[in-house]
Amino acid sequence: MKRIVFQLGLFQTAADRKPSERVLTKALELLYTADVEYLRQHPDTPGIYEAGVRYQREPIPAEVWKTPPYCIADGYADCEDLACWRAAELLVRHNIDARPAYTFKQIGNLSLYHIVVKHPDGTIEDPSKKLGM
């Protein structure tokens, strides 16, 4: 399988938080779209909660965004991988237009982003927590 690597330099300072969040939103949409297309082409892909994949945080500063076959092959994934996969699965298999979304928390000088699934009714699903976070 081929890879595309983006070197973006986001979230460097507090001043670039808002532009970085706009790019993050678009990047999540891109991974979600790739997952939707993959699941449509591979309907035999196991569901996220049946695939044997567990949550595992990537070492800082690495950020590798993976589609379902990479998650399954590795046996682990982090929050953006899992949330985008789950949102795509909800659309493709259950016709639920859920989307990946981020949460933000500031703890001292540390900015923490976490990716979850937002359902059409506004409820939040966190596949990372369900898979071992």
Image (spheres, helix red, strand yellow):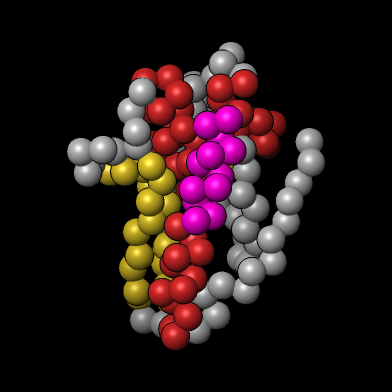
Residue 18 location (% of width, % of height): 41, 74
Q: Residue at x 62, y 74 (%)?
A: 9
Q: Residue at x 79, y 41 (%)?
A: 2
User: Is 42 on the left or on the right of 132, as rendered?
Assistant: right
Pick out the residue farthest to the top. 44
Location of residue 119 by image quarter:
top left
- Seen in the picture, residue 33 relative to 46 is either above or below; the reply is below
Viewer-proximal residue, 109 or 95? 95
**Residues shaded magenta:** 26-37
Residue 114 among magenta residues: no
Residue 90 location (% of width, % of height): 39, 28
Main SS of the magenta segment? helix
User: Is 103 on the left or on the right of 36, as rendered?
Assistant: left
Residue 38 location (% of width, % of height): 61, 28
Q: Residue at x 44, y 67 (%)?
A: 21
Location of residue 52 by image quarter:
top right
User: Is 114 on the left or on the right of 39, as rendered?
Assistant: left
Residue 96 seen in this snapshot: yes
